[in-house]
Amino acid sequence: HQQPQDSEEDGSETQERRLRRKPVAVKVLHPNIAHSVERDLTFMKRAAALLDTLPFDNIKCLSLSRAVANFETIMDRQVDLRIESENLIRFRSNFYTKNENDKRKTVELAFPKPVPGFVSTNVLVEDLIANDNLCNEHDEDAAASLWNTTTTTNDATTTTTTTPISAFLSDTTPQGMQTRKELAGPLLSAFLKMIFGDNFVHCDLHPGNVYVQTTTNTTEHGEMEKRHVIYFLDAGIAASLSPQSQRNLRDLFKAVVFNDGETAGRLMVERARYETCTQKIGGVDAFAKGMSEIVSEFHNRRNNNTGLTLGAVKIGSLLARVLDLCRVHGVEIDPSMVSIVISTVVLEGLGRSLEPDLNLIDFAIPFILGRSGTGGGQF
């Protein structure tokens, strides 16, 4: 492109020139991907519609047509990068202060910012949150300038580095273990906030999509202060639960805390759009008993000294077993719940690797009891 001209009146730079001086990430869709996705979805919808005509309760409880419709929504959003841009903006709004001029974050968590004017169906330009492994190995100085920056003033030196969160998992030094503990808490709180506070959940949070930016301030006297900001990337896949499903999930967490799975089970049957428990003698009691057994098992796994820690309790496994119980007893499952369960399994595993002794209850109670609030990133 032709180099843009500066304004003669005020000498200000144009947006294009400022953009050229700022490292950005450019995401481009593969050619013809939309056509391929549409073709595959058409086949899936026809197969689901055919299976739905079969007179089997277990198939009806799977809500195959709803599941395919939910999957179709997810995939349609994946092939339109404007949706990912909107998701990023919404996540940033959920985790940042309302005053856009206030650069202070209310939590140690962030999302890349889409560049206004450079977003389309097929292309998304956003802030670059870099990975050292992506650097040009033949240009170390240029690479370092992107991922590691150092500024010096009269009385302090500030160094900023960005690394994937997986790099911290192998650091078993005392300082490394302390850093891992510091990262695990905000990671878990952020996910709980997405589920119970915002009802807008990032569903692709594998370690490759989680980065940590570390800013180290060193004074002239050698005093050092570090600040970590966790970045969530690739926000194309996001899910929200129906009000009933969100209430069921909150009640399930409460049941684990208070060891009352039976009540949670009965409420799930009452709220289900479709269920066969009430059509069978003792069906509701059987489902409630199954819930009670699952919840009691997980509740009793708590460590006597530290309580319900990530190392003692696997919430992702709990949710998976509950979904299976729903299938067996004919209680319809919200298709969006599957995405939440998968995300929980992945992020919980990451949190457990960082800090297995992190007490789940300390972080979960404000959310499941409705004390956390929903705005401004307040946990």
Image: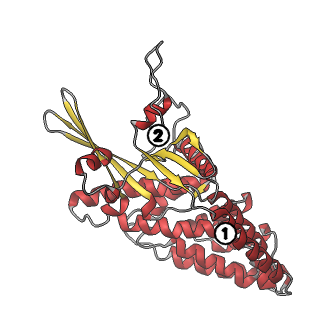
Residue located 45% across and 36% down the image: 19
**Number of dots carrying numbers:** 2
The x, y position of residue 67, in whole percent, is 72, 71
Residue 356 showing in the rendered view: no
Determine if residue 92 is in view. Answer: yes
The part of the image, by quadrant, that contains residue 93 is top right
For label 2, the SS is loop
Q: Is residue 96 above or below residue 252?
A: above
- 308 versus 324 height, above or below: above
The disc labelled 1 sits on which kind of residue? Ser
The residue to which callout 1 is attached is: 36
The answer to which image quadrant residue 349 occupies is: bottom left
- Compared across the picture, whether 57 is left or right of 302 comes to right
* Residue 106 numbered tag: 2
**Few, some or many C-alpha atoms within 10 Å of disc 2 (few <14, some 14-19, many ≥20)?**
some
For the point 23% across and 47% down, the residue is 141
Q: Report crowding for label 1: few under 14, some 14 to 19, many 20 or more residues within 10 A (C-alpha).
A: few
